Image: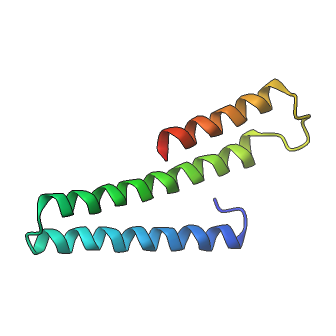
Amino acid sequence: MAHTLKEKQKRINRVRRIRGQLEAVERALEKDAGCAAVLQQATACRGALNSLIAEVVESHIREHVMDASAPRDDPREQGAEELVEIVRSYLT
């Protein structure tokens, strides 16, 4: 999936941070933290996961849908760029 080792490591690091955030939610629940604190941590996890999903979808579109050799004014390439923007705006 990751097309370079740098991207792979970057995504693995993101997943590890998300795991840490989820563990913080678990600890908060175990300690009977207030609802607001738990919700704030949970929504931070959701945001981080949404960002990761958007990044993976964008990478897939750029690597497997778009044609790097196509001219910039190709309608399909423009449509793919629009799709990337829609995914970004929806998930982040």
Residue 25: give x, y in percent of width and height. 24, 67
The foreground one among 34 and 22 is 34
Q: Quadrant of residue 16?
A: bottom left
**61, 73: nearer the viewer:** 73
Percent x, y of residue 8 = 63, 69
Quadrant into which the N terminus falls:
bottom right
Give the residue displayed 66% in from the left and 67% down from the top.
Answer: 7
Q: Is residue 15 above or below residue 74?
A: below
| Left/right of residue 33 with respect to residue 10 in the rendered view | left
Task: Determine the image quadrant of residue 88.
Answer: top right
Picture residue at 64% right of the left edge, 34% below the top: 83
Q: Tag count in the figure?
A: 0
Colour mode?
A: rainbow
Percent x, y of residue 80: 71, 34
Is 31 situated left or right of 79 in this image?
left
Q: Residue at x 74, y 49 (%)?
A: 63
Farthest-out residue, left? 32
Residue 59 on image: x %, y %: 66, 51
Q: Is residue 62 above or below residue 29?
A: above
Q: Say whether residue 64 is left or right of residue 31.
A: right
Quadrant for residue 85, please give it: top right
Q: Residue furthest top?
A: 75
Residue at position x 19%, y 75% from top? 27
Q: Please, is residue 72 above or below residue 57 in the view?
A: above
